Image (cartoon, rainbow, N blue to C red):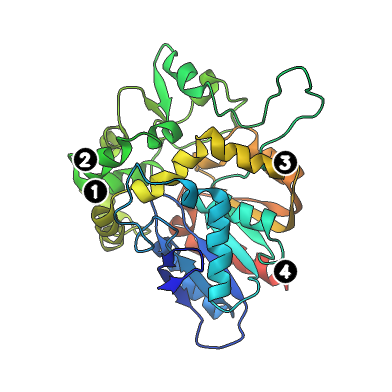
Amino acid sequence: MVDNNNGCTMHVLEAGFEEPGRPCVLLLHGFPELAFSWRKQLMFLAAAGYHVVAPDQRGYGRSGGAGVAFEDDLMPYSLINRVSDTVGLVKALGYDHVDAVIGHDYGSPVSAWCALLRPDVFRAVVLMSAAFPGAPVLPKGTAGRPGKGTLPLSGIPESLAALPRPRKHYRWYYSTAEANEDMWHCPQGVHAFLRAYFHYKSGDWPGNAPFPLASWAASELARLPTYYVMELGENMAETVAPHMPGADDIAACEWLTEAEMAVYSDEYGRTGFQGGLQGYRVGTDPRFNGELKAFSDRTIDVPAMFVSGARDWGTYQSPGALERMAGEICTQYRGTHLVEGAGHWVQQERPEEVNALLADFLRRLA
């Protein structure tokens, strides 16, 4: 446990700490994950000569995950404060900078903001499974007429609900007061819920054949699988339940064994999901989008790479984000890498391919 100098004691997994003076690499997980999600990278990167640190992010697992309530103040879970959490952790570990920050899923935007705001601390960045669209845009020449940003934070729930097949977006569902209870105390239990959730978003589910969406229009968003754009009347536990893999498929799942699955289900069974859900609430609250507008037009000017599964809808769930990240936001972009056969949990599903990409990226930095 490490006091991060920002009001959060963070649980970390680390490797390669035995030799003083090693360069440091930081790994940031997503939802519903933990530092444990990097178990297949920790020892590999340590063997490559790094001190590798993977924390449970604020509100997850043993970094204050238990006892988080919907009514709690959201400010500690803002993206700006998560950058403060991460800078504070780096300093607490005795470093002035890390060679790279690597983030998956929700850890991807956190890592992106770390690199955008503090390039002196985070010398390179790898984003996984969630493309970064950049800071909200402040358009020029809008005096006397309303302007539009790049991320539509209003109108999506209403437009999806008005479709002939009424739908809702998972980010807005995750921002509701009932989402935690729906998943934490679902009829099938946390273990079965997470098994179905991980399976449904993985390369093992045959329906995952992603493609770019043309726009944020409701008709386009409705093409996403129901784990992203849900049926209006169903919660997430109900959404994933029909996709629970059978006993033979579970036994054959080498990338996430039942013992490994139990690490997630035991922790989320203990803490609930609210600590992680706070991040989604921040993302749909215009107040927090407003504070990010201060960084409009800022770019990520350190070496950057994007890695995702070729079967991961997360690559395209934010229309236009991948293209903007590669073409405008990351000025030292080192490529988009879509790993064949992998779905959303790319570093767990295809660790050898991901590790090779990370090793090559880090080697080229040196």
Cα separation, mark 3 vs mark 1, equals 40 Å
Q: What amino acid type is highlighted by mark number 2?
A: Cys
**Label number found at residue 296:** 3
**Label number found at residue 186:** 2
Q: What amino acid type is highlighted by mark number 3?
A: Ser
Residue lying furthest left: 187
Image quadrant in which you'd find residue 48 = bottom right
Marks 3,1: beta carbons within 8 A = no
Q: Which residue is mark 1?
A: 190
Select label 2 or label 3 by which is in front: 3
Residue lying furthest top: 164
Marks 4,3: beta carbons within 8 A = no
Select label 4 or label 2 by which is in front: 2
The answer to which of 279 and 317 lies nearer the viewer is 279
Q: Secondary structure at mark 3?
A: loop
Q: Residues within 10 Å of mark 4 (few under 14, many from 20)?
A: few
Labels 2 and 3: the sequence-earlier one: 2
Q: Is residue 211 above or below residue 46?
A: above
